[in-house]
């Protein structure tokens, strides 16, 4: 009974996240979020304290550039994590580790093609390549949530108490850092990142259901 309730709760959570994503997507496609996104970017740029203006253009910005790199490096993290799981004879977990981020990437491209968000006043004239360049939802955010969320879940399953909480907190902080850095660097609008957080979280919940019970 508890397992069925848990499954229903997870299914409800996924449905809610997807509904919220679709609502946000419709609003984004209407163009009504642009002023909000621009204010959010200015707020993030000015909300991180620095010692001096020179520091603002050097150390702080270099640190923020690590955020997109963390999302991009999932291309290497996924196969390495899968190989490690295969070495530990956890083949099903390895299959999920490969399939889930790959599926999330394909889903992201499909969603980008649906909403086709570009920078204000810009248009894309490069055919299919436009899909990769569209903004909504954020690919970096989605891949960060799915990849590091899966790795975090596999690690956390081996611990209990404060150690498990520390692993989960670390994953949350990584995701938040990537999300903030994307807005700070103006790589994405805030609503792109929020869309990525919503659909990425939904995809992660589904992926966790595919893991063996002992590892989920």
Image: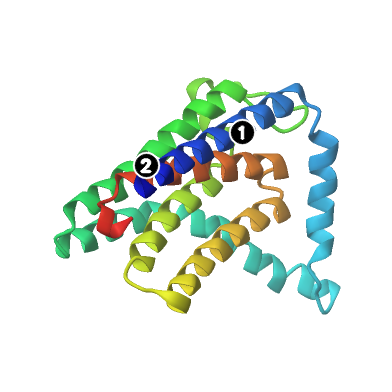
- In the picture provided, is 129 more to the left or to the right than 93? right
Residue 130 seen by the camera: no
- In the picture provided, is 158 more to the left or to the right than 64? left
Disc number placed over residue 21 in the picture, else none: 1
Q: Secondary structure at mark 2?
A: helix
Q: Residue furthest front?
A: 1
Instruction: Please tell me whether residue 41 is drawn above or below residue 28 in the rendered image.
Output: below
Answer with the quarter of the image where residue 50 lies. Answer: bottom right
Q: Residue shown at 29%/58% (left/top)?
A: 215
Q: Residue shown at 55%/29% (left/top)?
A: 112
Looking at the image, is mark 2 or mark 1 earlier in the sequence? 2
Residue corresponding to mark 2:
4
Q: Residues within 10 Å of mark 1 (few under 14, many from 20)?
A: many
x then y, percent, for residue 60: 71, 70
**Looking at the figure, which quarter contains the N terminus?**
top left
Residue 26 seen by the camera: yes
Q: Secondary structure at mark 1?
A: helix
Q: Residue shown at 56%/21% (left/top)?
A: 114
């Amino acid at each position: 009974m508890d397992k069925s309730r848990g499954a229903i709760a997870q299914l409800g959570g996924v449905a809610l996240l997807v509904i919220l994503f679709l609502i946000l997507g419709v609003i984004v496609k209407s163009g009504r979020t642009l002023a909000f996104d621009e204010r959010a970017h200015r707020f993030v740029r000015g909300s991180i304290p620095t010692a001096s203006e020179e520091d603002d253009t050097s150390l702080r910005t270099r640190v923020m550039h690590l955020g997109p790199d963390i999302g991009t490096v999932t291309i290497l993290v996924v196969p390495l994590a899968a190989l490690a799981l295969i070495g530990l004879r956890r083949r099903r977990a390895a299959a999920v580790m490969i399939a889930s981020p790959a599926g999330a990437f394909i889903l992201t491209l499909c969603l980008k093609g649906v909403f086709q968000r570009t920078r204000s006043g810009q248009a894309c004239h490069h055919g299919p390549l436009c899909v990769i360049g569209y903004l909504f939802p954020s690919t970096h955010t989605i891949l960060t949530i799915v990849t590091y969320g899966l790795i975090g879940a596999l690690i956390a399953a081996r611990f209990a108490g404060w150690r498990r909480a520390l692993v989960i907190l670390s994953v949350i902080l990584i995701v938040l850092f990537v999300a903030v850095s994307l807005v700070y660097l103006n790589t994405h609008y805030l609503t792109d990142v929020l869309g990525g957080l919503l659909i990425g979280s939904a995809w992660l919940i589904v992926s966790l259901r595919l893991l063996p019970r002992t590892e989920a």
